[in-house]
Amino acid sequence: MLVYAFDRTFDGLLSAVFDAYSLRQHPDMLMGEGEPLPLFCEEVHEVTTADDRAARVWAGLEKRLSKQALRMLMVSYLSELPELDTPLFQYIYKVFQQPEGRTSLERNFSDADVLAVTNIGRKVIHEQHRMLQFLRFQKAKDGTYLGVVSPDHNVLPLTVAHFKDRFRDQPWLIYDAKRRYGFYYDCQEVIRITFQHEESLPFDLDSGQLNDEVISKDDKLFQDMWRTYFKAICIRERMNPRKQLSDMPRRYWKYMTEKQ
C-alpha cells in the first residue's frame, strides 16, 4: 500500500496530485501528516506543498471541469472531514485521465469517489444555508453588529458575500468560535481576523454574548422583546419538539437569542 502524507490544505492536496503524475504513482490513500499509518503500509511519500504546482493542477482542472464541479471541489474541502481526503484526491486524479474539454466524470455518480465528494459537498452547502437562517446579531455600543457561530463545517467563507450584500451599510463581525477566526466588515471591505489574546475578547465564546460594558442598551431591550415574542407565538397545543429539532438542530441553540 502506497500512502501520501500531506498537510491537509487544499494546495497540499493539489500538490499531491502533481507528485502522483510526476512520479507516475497512484497512491492508495491520502492522510494528514503525523497521523497513524494504516496496516500493510509499504511506502509513505511526504508531499511538500508548493504554490506553483498547486496552481498548475488547478489550471488543468479549469480546462476539464465545469464551474459547478470546481465549486463542489472547493465546497467539499470546507467540510474538514478526514474521510474526504482520499476520495477528493482520486476524483481529481481521474479528471486528468479523461480528455481535455470533457466533463463526463463530474456527472458520473456511479463512481464512488465522485459520489462521495458530491454528497459531502451537499452537506456543506446545507450547513451554509442553516448559518444564514440561524445566525443572530447583537449590536455593540460603537454600532458594530456581532454574530458568533460554531458550525460543524467551515462554512463561514461561503456566507460572507450574503451578509456583505444584505448589510452593506452596517459594520459587522461574524466569528467562528470553533475555529477561532472571523470576518469583519467596515462598510467598505471584508477582512479576515483572528484574536491573539482571547481573554480580552468583548464577548463570551461559550454563549456568544457581548459583555455588559460593550453591548448596546437598545440591543438588550430588543433581545428581551424577541424572547417574549417567541414565547407568545408558541401554541402549546401544537408543539412538536421532534419537528422543531429537525428544522432547528439543538447544536445551534446556544447562540440563538430566543433559546437563551
Image: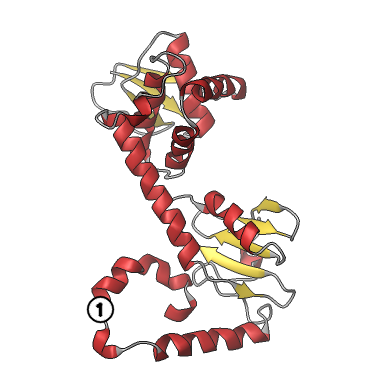
| Residue on which disc 1 sits | 240
Residue closest to the eye, 141 or 99: 99
Q: Quadrant of the C terminus?
A: bottom left
Residue visible at 42% across and 40% down?
76
Residue visible at 46% across and 42% down?
75
Q: Where is residue 57 in the image (x, y as percent from the top left)?
A: 52, 21
Residue closest to the eye, 195 or 150: 150
Vertical comparison of 35 with 45: above or below: below
Residue visible at 53% across and 50% down?
158
Question: In the rendered image, which quarter is residue 167 located in?
Answer: bottom right
Answer yes or no: is residue 260 visible: no
Q: Position of residue 205 (x, y in %)?
A: 53, 67
Q: Position of residue 198 (x, y in %)?
A: 61, 62
Image coloring type = secondary structure
Q: Residues within 10 Å of mark 1 (few under 14, many from 20)?
A: few
Q: Is mark 1 on a helix, strand or loop?
A: loop
- The count of marks equals 1
Residue visible at 43% across and 15% down?
20
Q: Where is residue 45 in the image (x, y as percent from the top left)?
A: 42, 18
Q: In which quarter of the image is the N terminus?
A: top left
Amino acid type at mark 1: Asn
Question: In the rendered image, which quarter is residue 91 located in?
Answer: top left
Answer yes or no: is residue 13 visible: yes
Vertical comparison of 130 with 138: above or below: above
